[in-house]
Amino acid sequence: MLKIAHRGAKAYEPENTLQAFQKALDLNSDGIELDVHLSADGHVIVIHDETIDKMTNGKGAVNSFNLSALKSFLIEGKHQIPTLREVFDLVDKKCFINIELKSRDTLQYVYELIKEYISQKNWNYEHFIVSSFDWTALQEIHNQNPKILIGVLTETDLHLALAFAETIQAKAIHPYYHLLNPENVQEIQKKGFLVLPWTVNMEEDIQKIKSYKVDGIISDFPDKI
Ligand code: G3P
Ligand code: CA
């Protein structure tokens, strides 16, 4: 059962910060999940929303700022917004990284970064899984390089996700956990895909989803899994 820390260990540290990812490592997570957007000068920025309004003391779209400007805004008065490169360097192969593409313009940059870490820093494909609700983005990244592991995110339609996963030979389906039952978990696994539901936080939900024998759980509380 893979323990995947949602936005880092979001229950314990501000989401998508280096501190949250360090906490996830301290809790022996098998993987971390994070969200990415692009800065105006082409850096992959780890933040959930397309604006910095909710998380920082600034206001505006992530893609309207250069990296240096983004670094001047603070989360809870002390944490900087990290780049994907900074997270890779922090994690340093200690667990896998589930990169959720929140905007299509990150695709090429994320791909280049993965390529760089595999070719120059001894990482391998198993260290990354790229997911998105934007299946066209997943199709594009698969077309670039079929070795990239892909997780097909779905909030509504498991069967459509499964059909799409077959067309791109995805590694996993990442369903909203309410879509699951023991039968459909088995059906997905029989077709060769991992089942990695999100975002399961309540103790009783974790127990229920575990009893379906999923392959892993994405949770704000990786330690509860
Ligand atoms: O990876 C699944 C989950 O993170 C999707 O929802 O809104 O937390 O990015 P959200
Ligand atoms: Ca996410």
Image (cartoon, rainbow, N blue to C red):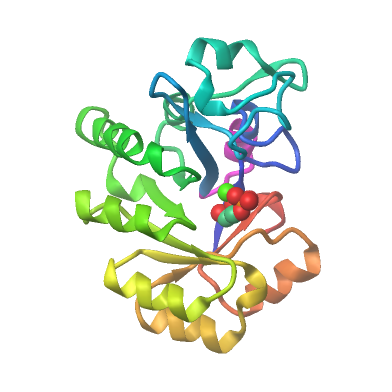
* Vertical placement of residue 130 versus 156, above or below: above
| Residue 60, picture quadrant | top right
| Residue 14, picture quadrant | top right
Count every numbered label the image shows and give the total.
0
| Residue 152, picture quadrant | bottom left
- Placement of the C terminus among the 4 image quadrants: bottom right
> Magenta span covers which residues?
21-30
Q: Residue at x 39, y 84 (%)?
A: 190
Q: Main secondary structure of the magenta part?
A: helix
> Is 111 in front, or is 69?
69
Magenta-drawn stretch contains 23: yes
- Placement of the N terminus among the 4 image quadrants: bottom right
Q: Residue at x 77, y 22 (%)?
A: 76
Q: Residue 98: x and y, percent? A: 47, 48
Q: Residue 63: x and y, percent? A: 50, 27
Magenta-drawn stretch contains 222: no
Residue 145 visible at all: no
Residue 199 visible at all: yes
Q: Residue 85: x and y, percent? A: 42, 26
In the shown orientation, is residue 76 left or right of residue 63? right
